[in-house]
Amino acid sequence: SRAATDATWELVDRSGRRIAADEVPAMRALRTGQVIRNQVVGLRDGRDEHRWLQVNAQPFTVDQNKTRIVVTFTDITAQELARRDAESTSELLSTIVETIPDAVAAYDAEGRLVFFNAALSALYSKSADAIRLGARLEDILRAGLANGQYPAAGDTIEEQEAWLARRLALHKSPPETPVLQHLDDGRWLQIRERVSKSGLIVGIRSDITALKAAENRVRVAAERDALTGLVNRKTFAERMEATLETLQAGDGSGAVVVLDIDNFKDVNDTLGHNGGDAFLQEVATRLTENCRAGDTIARLGGDEFALLLPPEVYSRSLALSTVSAIVERVCAPLDIAGRRLYPKMSAGVVLYPDDGRTAADLLKNADVAIYARQHEGRNGVSLYDPALKQQLSRRSELSARLREAIANDQVDVAFQAQVNLHTGEHVAFEALARWCLDGTMISPSEFVPIAEEFSMAKELDRLILRKSAALLARLKARGYEPGRVAINLSTDTLGDPLLVTTVGSVLEPHGITFNDLEIEVTECVVIERSHEKIRANLAETRERGALVALDDFGTGYASLRHLKTLRVDTLKIDQTFVRGVLRDRGDATIVKAIINIARSLNIGVVAEGIESERQALFLASQGCRIGQGYLFHKPESDIEELVRHLDGWRWNR
């Protein structure tokens, strides 16, 4: 009490408030007669330094008029300062925990909540009412289940009870790796729990929704085609493999379809790449709209798409009709950049497991089927046939051997004569490519298309042109007048900007000029994208002295307008019409019409494939002047045989 009145010290309570004189523990005990036990007071000096005392006061009565008091003071400064530090640390820790966005919760060994921060209630809004100190984790989880907070728990009571049991088991024995939890509002939480030394189960729940979204974007980028949003080739193959594995456990079959957009390059050339991209996106949309939800639709790359039709009882006829219907709807006219387009698609179909038991085999065989479709005229659907694979294998082998043969100058040329059907005299030759592989003659109808398909056409054309010029020069050198030599050039060669220069450089070393040539073009040339360049090139060769012939007339897509724009000198009637001219009224009518068209346009006519005198006489009677075929001359490579033909030969009618 005296200390309380000391000028240096003053008495304060734990909050730092000054204690009035009548509230000093000893004075209050005397005044009230109360026993004071373990009251903590502080002595504060002018420098704000404290000493803390524990006060006990025991009043007792000596007689009726006198009260005495026993007061004990215990210095507890060290203990009080330690307590205050602990409270300060706890308050700081609580402040920190409340400021972090993650939810923090601690449960005792019986699963009762002993600590949590506000973030816990914020994350689990549908079970917030159940989150309070002393609440069991099971009750909190059940509250969330009742409100549909956990979609992974399932819909039935059995599913939810099983989910709850698994979650409680993980809580009691926390795994080393975090547990992921999906909430009904779309958020993803990551739960990390550990058991402390004191037995508390402390857990942190972090919202990783943004991370999951980023992972999903990366996954989608890895699995999807950026332009169309369809799955890509890698994902398509993975789904095929998964489907095949599932199929091994049951019956049924499915179909894999590969689709190519026919002549897609024309779209890019016409509308530019932006228009081409819009075209591909529209095709992808139509495929999605016309397939079922369970079908997998992919863009394999470029203008190539694919379908994986899930296992059902597919027959080949059903697969063909199903895919044909899809292709028909996808190929309906569409408008892109103000242009009306008419899509065309070629599709190859394989059935699994009959046509392949791996994704690689199925895609390979689907490519075989679509390859066959494209060689049959495109724009349609073809089923895989093992025989097609053998044909493709042969084409692949022939392409490699042909490339080698061209490089080694092993493709030869043979001349076949053309004669005047009215006088029987020799008029000219046609140069025909000849290739003998391992002792077997390969037909030009087989290896010439291979040369065009595998980008060897220009090299083959130069070789035939060079050998023809050399053979023609040898005949001239021996004093003969063999006439012009007709040479069929490919579309690639005809569209080459350097065509005239290239041809001239091949002819010149042999003393042959354009006046010795007749350049043959097929009807398909007139509908090529490079038609204008071809027309200009042919016009320049005519200016140099060459003639231009339209080969196989009547079998392609040429029209009278094309005859006018190309300015051809000769029409060659295809041998398929000549062969049937005596027994088929239709063939005879076509032949007569071609001859009349040529006469009206002042164009010459050559009939190919004449094998009998009756054919020759009929053609001559209709006004056809020149004929070619085995009746007159078989193709020859040997110069002596050609000389014998030229040495005074004539056809005796």
Image: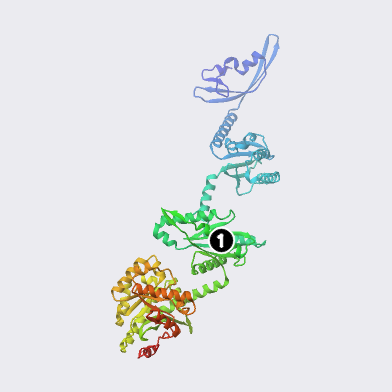
Q: Is residue 541 visible?
A: yes
Quadrant assignment, res 634: bottom left
Residue 230 in sight from this viewpoint: no
Color encoding of the figure: rainbow
The image shows residue 344, relative to residue 487, as above or below, that is above
Residue under the point 56% across and 25% down? 51
Depth order, front residue of 348/170: 348
Q: Quadrant of residue 321?
A: bottom right
Q: Position of residue 645 (x, y in %)?
A: 38, 89
Going by the picture, which residue comes out furthest to the top? 65
Quarter containing the C terminus: bottom left
Quarter of the figure with residue 109: top right
Total numbered labels placed on residues in the image: 1
Mark 1 closeness class: few <14, some 14–19, many ≥20 residues within 10 Å: many
Write the residue at 71% across / 10% down: 63
Residue placed most toward the observer, 335 or 392: 335
Q: In the rendered image, which quarter contains the N terminus?
A: top right
Q: Position of residue 244 (x, y in %)?
A: 62, 62
- Horizontal side of residue 482 vs 361, given as left or right: left
Residue 312 in percent (x, y) is at 64, 60
Q: Specify whether 489 is left or right of 31.
A: left
Asked whether, in this view, residue 511 is left or right of residue 159, the answer is left
Q: Secondary structure at mark 1?
A: helix
**Residue wearing tag 1:** 323
Above or below residue 117? Residue 471 is below
**What percent of the width, then of the height, locates residue 36?**
65, 20
User: Which of the pair 644/498 is nearer the observer?
Assistant: 644
Amino acid type at mark 1: Val
Nearest to the observer: residue 108 or residue 489: 489
